[in-house]
Image (cartoon, grey):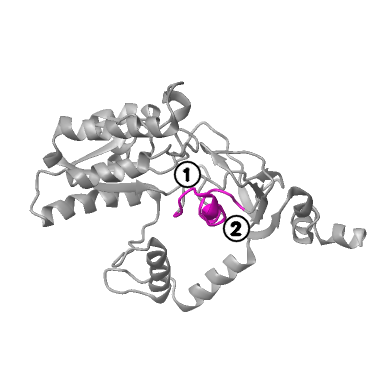
Amino acid sequence: MASVFYRDPGHDYPVAVRGEGVYVYDADGKQYLDGSGGAAVTCLGHGHPDVIGAIKSQVDQLAYAHTAFFTNEPQEKLAARLAERFGEAGARVYFLSGGSEANETAIKLARQYWLAKGCPDKHIVISREQSYHGNTLGALSLSGNPMRRDIFAPCLHDWPRIEPCYAYRHQQDDETDDEYGERAAQALDDAINEHGADNIAAFVAETVVGATLGAAPPVGPYMKRIREICDRYDVLLILDEVMAGLNPTEVDELIALLRDVNQQGVSIFLIEHVMRGVMALSTRVIVINYGVKIAEGSPAEVVKDKQVIEAYLGKEFLSAQG
């Protein structure tokens, strides 16, 4: 173990030896609640039999084939499923191994796109303050997280960043959500004009800001206005949804959203109304376990549901209660 270059060389790390459900266990048998799903990127828990079975089945057939020379059936099937949900004809999927790599690739694709279009001056990517897009140098250049940026600042692109859509701090008392959303989006319009639309390749933003603001969603017409501004000035729009998942935070999409976000195997109580990212109690409750909806209804109905009781207390409790 002494040969490992740890994230914190001075820290004495416990040795993780196994995982089960929402828990990780170390070599001494101590149990840890993996409440955020690692780095807030996993949703299925540890040791899920379906996941284990799928991995074993694939390894038995083929573990690796370089994509410079081959495609493969799992890739084709998943790409088709994602493209169908995207809802735009001709959508394509490019698979990568993590968020930093995904955002680095998005920057490069934007650059290559404008070169192919005969617009070599379009190279600047505008982002937002209090954002996080990854820890590689290109992705860190996009990020507005001072703590992560400071020591690497001389190595980073000095691209413009605008104020985020963060109603909790920036919405004025006399502003409606629509008024604040419009004002926040105007910052992008101003930045494009300041630096010249002919120089701007793309604007990148987290749809729901994760690591730096803590689940801060857009307000009012903000995202719609951002889309309109990008279209007006011929600027590409890159949405970083590595943490937010592939779905918008609309009520009807909450179940699908949680399958992609950082809820790891815990039975999660959801509600019907979302106001600025804060989930409040309602008359309708949805229970998610291992990313699958197991119950829905009023709180009184849900707490009596056999699947919910089993998820929380086990089959033995059900047997004892008859």
Q: Which residues are magenta?
A: 246-264
Q: Is residue 113 above or below residue 151?
A: below
Q: Position of residue 92 (x, y in %)?
A: 31, 65
Q: Which residue is mark 2?
A: 291
Looking at the rendered structure, which numbered label has been put on residue 220? none
Query: Which of pointers 1 and 2 lies earlier in the amino acid sequence?
Result: 1
- At x 28%, y 32%, the residue is 186
Circle 2 residues within 10 Å: few <14, some 14–19, many ≥20:
many
- At x 61%, y 46%, the residue is 15
Circle 1 residues within 10 Å: few <14, some 14–19, many ≥20:
few
Q: Is residue 313 above or below residue 66?
A: above
Q: Position of residue 83 (x, y in %)?
A: 37, 65
Q: As rendered, which of 53 and 4 lies closer to the eye?
A: 53
Q: Which residue is mark 1?
A: 4
| Residue 9 in sight in this render | yes
Q: Secondary structure at mark 2?
A: loop
Q: Position of residue 285 (x, y in %)?
A: 68, 50
- At x 43%, y 22%, the residue is 172
